[in-house]
Image (cartoon, rainbow, N blue to C red):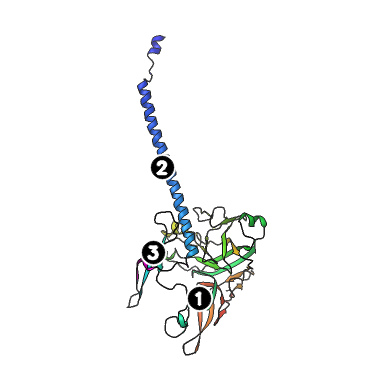
Amino acid sequence: MSKFFSKRSGFTLVEIVVAFAVFSIMAAMLVSLAGLAVRQRQSNNNLSRDLSNQQAYLAEHERETVYNAADYGGTFEFDFGGGLNAPPLNYSVVRASDDATSEGGIRYFVADANVNNKPVPGGDDGDGDGRSLVLAEKVDSRLYGSSNFEYIRVQNVNKVTDPSVLSDLGVPSDSSMYTLDVYAVDNDAAIRKEDTRLARNYKMRFESDILDCGYVGSSSNYISYQNATFGSDGKVSGGGSNQFEILPCSGDTVRVSIPHGIISKYFESGSINDSNCFPGVESKFYVVLKGDVALTESSFGSNVTLNEFGQHVYYPVKAKVTTTDKDGNDHTEDVNFINVYGAFAKAGTVILNPEVP
């Protein structure tokens, strides 16, 4: 028996030490790789959050940024062929946020031009006849955006009075919260691939500054735009069928658009369509407005009309615009505001309410 056990194979002390050394090295490598993966994921999350903050900053401050010659970035040259050339336009390149922590971040162009849609002194739009046809001077636009919608329907505008909801969202006592269902109907016009990044978006302007906005989920839950995340299908997580992005901009305006992730996902294939952006369902969202604001479905223009179901519909604005030239002669023209869906008339303008087809 002793002879049998003496012939059993085993490990020497040296072999055990070597095995432990190899195991330790492999364990150290695995720990190092795991730590690297965690740090990279954290870095990606920080970058994503930073870019989202920059995007929100840009949306909120887009009208506050002016051209600065000290930040000159280049010159745009416009050649339309046949001798039709526009004057060169200088531009500067600006970061979306001075507080951005990521390297580079979102940068955008600011042109050396008047982009405020304000008429030049004397009421002339530059053609020398003493008249101005600047659109912003003729109508008070409340609902506007890309020109590829047949109409935009605003329905179910409801004021939120539930104290628990107002408390959970931190709504100030001197403000108003409303939910809206908005249905933007595409006109089936073909959209070029290069235009898809700008296609299908609209803005809604209110009579008061916006304190917050966000999404209304299928369970009547509320998700602030600051906390929203999107799934691979472009829908807001926890937001039901909502497949859009809402951001506040210009103080009293919100922008509703195709989610950035959806644009990136479908841009290369050119398959932006009704199935992956603004599908055939209402976009449900909420806004918190400063002060006690009375908001209804008719608050976005005198051109609102009711369809056969009694729903409030806004078609592109058509108007008769009267201007006076430098000699005192009046000129009345029919103007189609192809990207303005809801507006109130200003002096010299008569809005023609379209009939429902």
The residue singled out by tag 2 in the image is 36
Circle 3/circle 2 CB separation < 8 Å: no
Span of residues in magenta = 64-76
Of the two numbered discs 3 and 1 on the same chain, state the one appearing first in sequence. 3
Q: Residue 40: percent from the left, percent from the top?
A: 42, 46
Q: CA distance from mark 1 to mark 2?
A: 54 Å
Q: CA distance from mark 3 to mark 1?
A: 27 Å
Q: Residue 201: percent from the left, percent from the top?
A: 50, 65
Q: Give SS at disc 3.
A: strand
Identify whether 40 is placed above or below 267: above
Decide: few, some or many residues near mark 2? Use Cα within 10 Å; few <14, some 14-19, many ≥20: few
Circle 1/circle 2 CB separation < 8 Å: no
Of the two numbered discs 3 and 2 on the same chain, state the one appearing first in sequence. 2
- Location of the N terminus (image quadrant): top left
Residue 333 visible somewhere in the drawing: yes
Please tell me whether mark 3 or mark 2 is closer to you in this view.
3
Amino acid type shown at disc 1:
Ala
Residue located at (55% from left, 75% from top): 140
The image's mark for residue 136 is 1
Q: Residue 307: percent from the left, percent from the top?
A: 61, 71
Q: Give SS at disc 1.
A: helix
Residue located at (57% from left, 53% from top): 238
Amino acid type shown at disc 3:
Val
Amino acid type shown at disc 2:
Leu
Q: How many marks?
A: 3
Residue located at (37% from left, 32% from top): 25
The image's mark for residue 93 is 3
